Amino acid sequence: MIKKIKCNICNNRFYIDKNQVKEVSENKGLSSLTTGSNVYNAIDCPNCGCQKILWTRLPEVKK
C-alpha cells in the first residue's frame, strides 16, 4: 500500500518519488569532527519547495 506524505508547511499531500529522494547531512560545526554528522533522506515538496525529512540514514557496519 502506497501512502502519501504530508508537507509540514503547506499541508500538501504527495507520493514519494524515489528518483527525487536525496541524501542530506546536518552541519553541526566543529562538534561534527568528534561525533560525526547526521545523515537523512529528504525530498522537496512539489507545492512549496520546502525540504521534508523522511528518515535517518544509519552508518554501515563494516566487519
Image: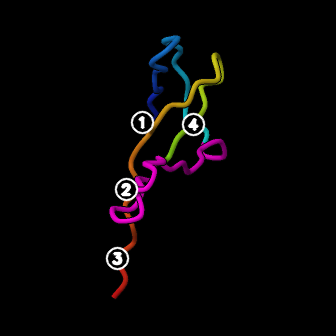
Where is residue 61? Give x, y as percent.
34, 76
Nearest the viewer among 43 and 37 is: 37
Instruction: Look at the image and give the residue range highlighted in magenta.
Output: 18-39
Closer to the observer: label 2 or label 1?
Answer: 2
Q: Residue 43: which numbered mark, if any?
A: 4
Q: Secondary structure at mark 4?
A: strand
Q: Residue at x 55, y 51 (%)?
A: 23
Q: Secondary structure at mark 1?
A: loop
- Say whether marks 4 and 1 touch (CB < 8 Å): no
Nearest the viewer among 54 and 5 is: 54
Residue of label 2: 31
Marks 1 and 3, the one that precedes in the sequence? 1
Marks 4 and 2, the one that precedes in the sequence? 2
**Label 2, residues with CA under 10 Å away: few <14, some 14-19, many ≥20:** few
Q: Is residue 33 magenta?
A: yes
Q: Amino acid at mark 4?
A: Ile
Image-quadrant location for residue 8 = top left
- Say whether marks 2 and 3 touch (CB < 8 Å): no
Marks 4 and 1, the one that precedes in the sequence? 1
Nearest the viewer among 28 and 58 is: 28
The answer for how far apart the CA atoms under marks 4 and 2 are is 26 Å
Where is residue 34? Give x, y as percent.
35, 65
Q: Residue furthest bottom?
A: 63
- Say whether marks 3 and 4 touch (CB < 8 Å): no
